[in-house]
Image (spheres, grey):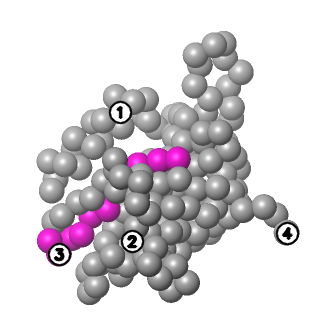
Amino acid sequence: MHRYRILFLCALLLTGCGKSGKPAAESTTTGGGAGAAATISLADVAGTWDGKVTLAGNDTVITVTELTATAEPTGWMMMVANAKTPTKMTSAPVTSVVAAGDSLVVDAGPYSSVLRAGQQVTTHGVYRLQDGKLVGTVVATYPASGQMLTLHSEATRRAAK
C-alpha cells in the first residue's frame, strides 16, 4: 500500500504538481508565453460542482459527487452517492485542500464507502481546470483491506441561482 502511495506521489512530482512557494489562496494565473502552465487558485474553483466518477479507462459512471468549494482551504464539503442510487448522498469530509501550480489537491475521508458496504474509504484527488470543467484523477484507499482504486473524475460548475 505504501509503495503505491510513494509511486503516486512521485508521479505527481514528475507532472509538475510540486507545491508552490505562495500560500494556496494567493496563487494567481500567470500570463506567461505559449506553453506556460497557468496556476490555479482556490478562488478559481469556488462554487458548487456536480461530478461523475468512473474507473480509470472506463466510461461507466460508478459514483456521483457534489463538491462545494470556497476561496479558502476551509469550508469545503463533498457529498458522494452510488450512481445507482444518486439521491442517497453520503457526506465525505474534506480534510485538506491545496492549490499547487496548475493543480488542485483534495483529500477526503475516512467516510462510509458508497460502493463497498460496511467499509471506510479515503480519497486523494488531483484536479485541473480543463475547458471549464474540474477534471482529475482520484485514488480511493480502503484502509481495512489495503485496496486502492484509481478513478477519473469530471465535474461541471453549477450555475449560480
Residue 112, image quadrant: bottom left
Distance, label 3 to label 4, CA atoms, is 41 Å
Residue ID for mark 2: 109
Disc 4 from disc 2: Cα separation: 29 Å
Q: Residue 3 vs residue 97: left or right?
A: left
Residue at label 3? 144
Which residue is depicted at the point 57% across and 25% down?
A: 37
Q: Earlier in the sequence, mark 3 or mark 4?
A: 3
Label 1: which residue?
Answer: 13
At x 44% / y 63%, what residue is drawn? 61
Start and end of the magenta stretch? 135-145
- Whole-percent x, y for residue 87 in the image: 55, 84
Q: Is residue 107 magenta?
A: no
In three-dimensional space, the C-alpha distance between marks 3 and 1, rounded to whole angstroms, equals 28 Å
**Mark 1 vs mark 2, CA separation in Å:** 23 Å
Regarding mark 4 in the picture, which secondary structure is present there?
loop
- State the residue at coordinates (39%, 71%): 109
Q: Position of residue 147 (x, y in %)?
A: 18, 64
Which amino acid is tagged 3? Answer: Ala
Amino acid type, label 4: Lys
Helix, strand or loop: magenta stretch: strand
Secondary structure under badge 3? loop
Q: Residue at x 36, y 37 (%)?
A: 12
The mark lying in front, picked from 1 and 4, is 4
Identify the residue position indicated by label 4 in the image. 161
